[in-house]
Image (cartoon, helix red, strand yellow):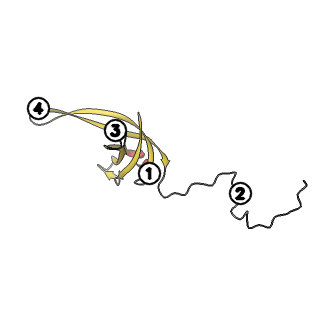
Amino acid sequence: MDIKGKVHEISPVMNVTETFKKRELVIEYAENPSYPEYIKFEALQDKVNLFDTLKPGDQVEVFFNLRGRPWTDRNGKTAYFNTLVVWRVNALTATNTPAPAPEYAPPADFNSAPQDDDLPF
């Protein structure tokens, strides 16, 4: 599954145990811009580094797996939990990042360089 949205919040890496770590990412999903949704994703273990280059405001495409599990409390009541586990993130646009110059653009000093008026036509 995948979804596109804007980075709202990124948590620091959380060491749940000595061998298990996770990190959370909240995306603002604005299918209806009047009522945006804030969706929380988790990255686990070696995937926590996927969020290192992201900043709030970046437009991203998040690829994830949907996981669900039951949990039974002391009274025997069962509750169900869903988790969105990230396996890839593509940055679509980044905030405050200058756009690269196109390959066909003239050099910055093009107009200030002396021009040779000796044209063959």
User: Which of the labelled discs sits on residue 76, or is there none?
Assistant: 4
**x and y, in percent, of residue 63 in the image:** 43, 38
**Cα distance between the residues tagged 4 and 3:** 26 Å
Tell us which disc is closer to us: 4 or 1: 1
Tell us which disc is closer to us: 1 or 3: 1
Q: Which residue is mark 2?
A: 106
User: Which of the labelled discs sits on residue 25, or is there none?
Assistant: none
Amino acid of disc 3: Leu
Q: Residues within 10 Å of mark 1 (few under 14, many from 20)?
A: many
> Is mark 1 in CB contact (under 8 Å) with mark 2?
no
Q: Judge whether 105 appears above or below 45 on screen.
A: below
Seen from the viewer's position, the closer of residues 45 and 5 is: 5
Amino acid of disc 1: Asp
**x and y, in percent, of residue 89 in the image:** 45, 43
Asked whether the viewer can see residue 75, the reply is yes
Label whose residue precedes the other's in the sequence (4 or 1) = 1
The residue at the far left in this view is 75
> Is mark 4 in CB contact (under 8 Å) with mark 3?
no
